[in-house]
Amino acid sequence: MRAIPLLLAAAALTGCVTQPPPATRSAEAQAEFQKLIAGKVAGRPLTCLQSYRSGEMVTIDNSTVAFKNGSTVYVNHLIGECSGLKSGWYTLVTRSSGPGMCRGDIADVADVRTGMVVGSCAIGDFTPYTRT
């Protein structure tokens, strides 16, 4: 008798951890993304970006950021949406568990004026885009 309630509880919890469908990108964000990767092809995703500079980060939308490194662009589709990231008053602050930034590292969205954290998400895989 106890097995049925436990199975129902497990099924309910399993439904809660599924990833929501990705947010629709605005036409402006899509145009910015296409401009960033124009003439480049996607490579095999990487789990870590060993070195980067925060000044090289480009925010596409609340779910996508990119890092420029020379002619290569590393696109990261965040795990979960970092609400407000695209606004001009917020920045991404990461906590890394190793060298560089890796999949699963926590990223906070902080207000640059007050330093207050207003949301968080996790870093996804990095897809390198290079010229052919």
Image (cartoon, rainbow, N blue to C red):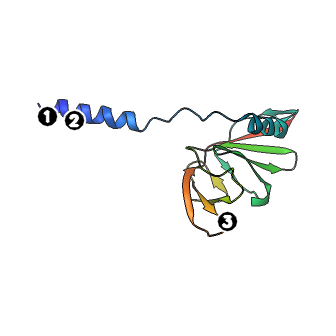
Q: Quadrant of the C terminus?
A: top right
Task: Indicate the secondary structure of the residue bearing disc 3.
Answer: loop
Residue where numbered disc 1 is placed: 2
The dot on residue 112 is 3
**Residue ID at (79%, 38%):** 129
The CA span between labels 3 and 2 is 46 Å
User: Looking at this view, is 26 or 121 the one in front?
Assistant: 26
Residue where numbered disc 2 is placed: 6
Name which quarter of the figure residue 98 lies in: bottom right
Expressed as whole percent of the image width and height from the top left, the position of residue 10 reads 29, 35
The CA span between labels 3 and 1 is 51 Å
Horizontal side of 111 relative to 36 (left or right) equals left
Task: Indicate the secondary structure of the residue bearing disc 1.
Answer: loop
Dot in front, 3 or 2? 3
User: Looking at this view, is 28 or 41 the one in front?
Assistant: 28
Q: Are marks 1 and 2 in contact (CB under 8 Å)?
A: yes
Residue 95 makes an appearance in the image: no
Expressed as whole percent of the image width and height from the top left, the position of residue 50 reads 71, 54
